[in-house]
Amino acid sequence: MISDRVVLDDWHVVAASRDLAAGNLLSVKLMQEEVLLWRGSDGQVHAWEDRCPHRGCRFSIGKVKNDKVVCPYHGWEFAGSGACTLRPAHPHQEVPKAIQAKPYHVEEHYGLIWVCLGTPAQPVLDYPEFQNPKLRQVLCGPYDVAAAPPRVIENFLDQAHFSYVHAGILGLEEKAEVKPYKVARDVDGCGVVATDLHFWQPQTNALIHGGSDVEYAYRCPRPFTAILTKKPAAQEGYSESILLTLQPLDEEHVKAWIILSMTNFEQSEEDLRSFQDTIFLQDLPIVENQVPVKLPLDPRAEMPQPADLLSAQYRRWLLDLGLEYGVIRPAA
Ligand code: FES
Ligand code: CO
């Protein structure tokens, strides 16, 4: 079991709301725990340990009947509260109150289902772009990545790779220079923010034709979530935010979820997703080939360049938070 309260008491995405219809069961994994999701007829989502307290059978191979989860092994029934209401082998006996499914905290925001395995230390992260009616919301992923969660976030915050990993789209080798930019800590509920980043990009989004100077800003509201905002100079009035949030499966594997919030209402969701897939699949072999797998937080462990100011501050923030999950902390 994980001892790291920073991740245990945080909310993590585990599924898309649209993938869980009322009356269905869904088995998801979060930090090595198997979690059952199910939705009652009132629309309420429940998240439980995916294990019947009787003889340990996974609930997720059972079914929902009359708003109760029915274990497939001996037919015990569990109400939304988690309480066992029926043991069919003893229909005339009252069920002892101690027989309960183990519930986890669960909420729905931004079209996603979020679970906290511990005690929530704060609300689910704030993403106001999702409420903005001028922006179209497109869910991308989830992408399976064999990498530690903070390595995946750090890659999202990294700018010097654009001209190499995303050459011809987000950068060009002959324009690889990263100009100085600003980084701050603890701004508006975000641990790290970066502003005033400027690049020339050949095809910064799926809509643009021809290159543009693009202004970037980043913010990290949670250790495993980062938000990027792009403003291409060549597209008057265009706005785009990209939220990347991770479902940690274990310390070395994640599912990466992306929400695009953009003024592009012209193109099909399929086209927008396919553009994002292309970018993500270019990053995939890189983050899966970083050694060691876990992110080293000792500033002396790897050799930063000046362009890495943001990732250096991200590491510093994780260190200050006391995060242990997916990182290598400096020897005491
Ligand atoms: Fe679930 Fe027996 S294992 S009812
Ligand atoms: Co990239």
Image: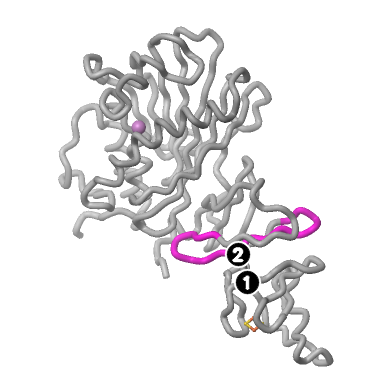
Q: What is the CA distance from the residue labelled 1 to the residue labelled 2?
A: 7 Å
Q: Which residue is mark 1?
A: 59
| Quadrant where the C terminus is found in the figure | bottom left
Front residue of 188 and 254? 254
The amino acid type found where label 1 is placed reads Phe
Which of the 4 image quadrants contains residue 281? top left
Residue 94 in the figure: left or right of residue 306: right
First in sequence: mark 1 vs mark 2? 2
Q: Which mark is residue 290?
A: none
| Marks 1 and 2 in Cβ contact (< 8 Å) | yes
The amino acid type found where label 2 is placed reads Leu
Residue 170's place in the image compared with 224, above or below, is: above
Q: Is mark 1 within 8 Å of ligand 1?
A: yes
Which of the 4 image quadrants contains residue 212? top left
Residue 318 in the figure: left or right of residue 59: left
Asked whether residue 40 is drawn in magenta, I would say yes
Judging from the image, the colouring scheme is: one colour
Residue 67's place in the image compared with 108, above or below, is: below
Residue 50's place in the image compared with 192, above or below, is: below
Asked whether residue 246 is drawn in magenta, I would say no
Which of the 4 image quadrants contains residue 237? top right
Q: Which residue is mark 2?
A: 36
List x then y, in percent, for residue 153: 38, 41
Q: Which residues are magenta?
A: 28-44
Residue 96 in the figure: left or right of residue 104: right
Q: Residues within 10 Å of mark 1 (few under 14, many from 20)?
A: many
List x then y, in percent, for residue 158: 31, 32
Quadrant position of ligand 2:
top left
- What's the residue at 58%, 78% (across, down)? 57
- What's the residue at 49%, 20% (across, down)? 206
